[in-house]
Image (spheres, rainbow, N blue to C red):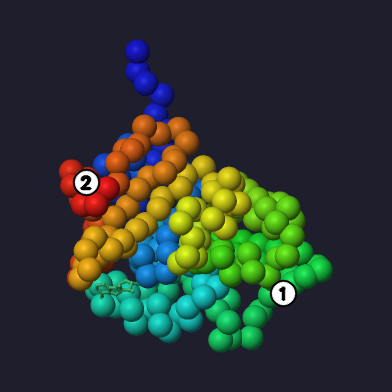
Amino acid sequence: MTQYKIERVKTGIPGLDELIEGGFPKGDTILVAGKAGTGKSILATQFLYRGAVDYGEPGVLVTLEEPPRLIKRNMMRFGMDLEKLEREGMLAIVDLSPAKPSPVNIGEYPSFDLSGLEAIIMHHVKKINAQRVVIDTLSILAYKFKSRDILREEIFKLCAHITSYGCTLLLTSEIPAQDTGLGVFDIEAFLASGVIVLYNEKISDTSRSRSIEVLKLRGSKHSSRIHSMRITDEGIRVWPGEISPGT
Ligand SMILES: Nc1ncnc2c1ncn2[C@@H]1O[C@H](COP(=O)(O)OP(=O)(O)O)[C@@H](O)[C@H]1O
Ligand SMILES: [Mg+2]
């Protein structure tokens, strides 16, 4: 009997595909969670960069935190030229960073509405025929919405609309430093069909160690271990055979 295979999207993170049966299920919503500085933005941007360069899949980066200028500068350190991709029509960056007057009303209390955000994202998705979409970071929205129920509903609608076009959607979510569990990101985790957690834990008085865990991935037999991860000169890399020290 041939086994039914889900269509997969290569993550563009060396070593990660091997933990998840070859990639993210196409058209799913995946949450990348972790504390500040764990590599969420780099991982998400690398997903778009490698998707465009290695697999010919255009992507949309929605940035709610860092201005595009800084993202481009930082990604250049890994040899990833985002500006070139923009010129080639393989990448669109939607700048919703706080430094810039927002082109859309994200909907603050009490209006609760992400339809403006959805419209601008879909405009870019259609324009470049995007296969991959990143929203970095959802946590910013969580602060604007006072009602968790409405936030959940709005994010659900947004994700459903983007993925209904066949796009694979990566969301990032920040776990507060003092949070010992998965804390505020439970809303997004509930909505996402996959959750990847990044760590940068202290392993001694003088050192930290980066690692990655696939917490859940619907429709996939994934690793249940915590694997070593590093940020190298070429970006993020995972060592599938290496179990993280301290775990
Ligand atoms: N060129 C680089 N080489 C090695 N590590 C880097 C490089 N650039 C950034 N980093 C590491 O990555 C961290 C930032 O990653 P980022 O994806 O922005 O984190 P997050 O989005 O989770 O807050 C920095 O704090 C630093 O530790
Ligand atoms: Mg970030």
Residue 217, visible in the rendered structure = yes
From this view, report whether residue 56 is shown above or below residue 93: above
Q: Residue at x 47, y 44 (%)?
A: 194
User: On the rendered image, what quadrant is the N terminus found in?
Assistant: top left
Q: Nearer the viewer, residue 221 or 53?
A: 221
Measured in 3D between alpha carbons, the distance from the residue under mark 2 to the one under mark 1, in whole angstroms, is 44 Å
Q: Position of residue 179 (x, y in %)?
A: 49, 60
In the image, farthest residue toward the top: 1
Residue topped by disc 2: 243
Residue 115, visible in the rendered structure = no
Secondary element type, mark 2: strand
Q: Nearer the viewer, residue 119 or 16?
A: 16
Q: Residue at x 73, y 65 (%)?
A: 146
Q: Residue at x 63, y 64 (%)?
A: 142
Q: Position of residue 149 (x, y in %)?
A: 73, 53
In the image, farthest residue toward the right: 110
Instruction: Residue type at mark 1: give it.
Output: Asn
Left/right placement of residue 199 relative to residue 188 reads left
In the image, farthest residue toward the front: 205
Q: Quadrant of ligand 2?
A: bottom left
Residue topped by disc 1: 105
Q: Position of residue 203 (x, y in %)?
A: 24, 60
From this view, report whether residue 219 is shown above or below residue 69: above
Of labels 2 and 1, earlier in sequence is 1
Q: Nearer the viewer, residue 2 or 234?
A: 234
Can you tell which quarter of the image residue 217 is in? top left
Instruction: Residue type at mark 2: give it.
Output: Ile
Callout 2 crowding tier (Cα within 10 Å): few <14, some 14–19, many ≥20: some
Label number found at residue 10: none
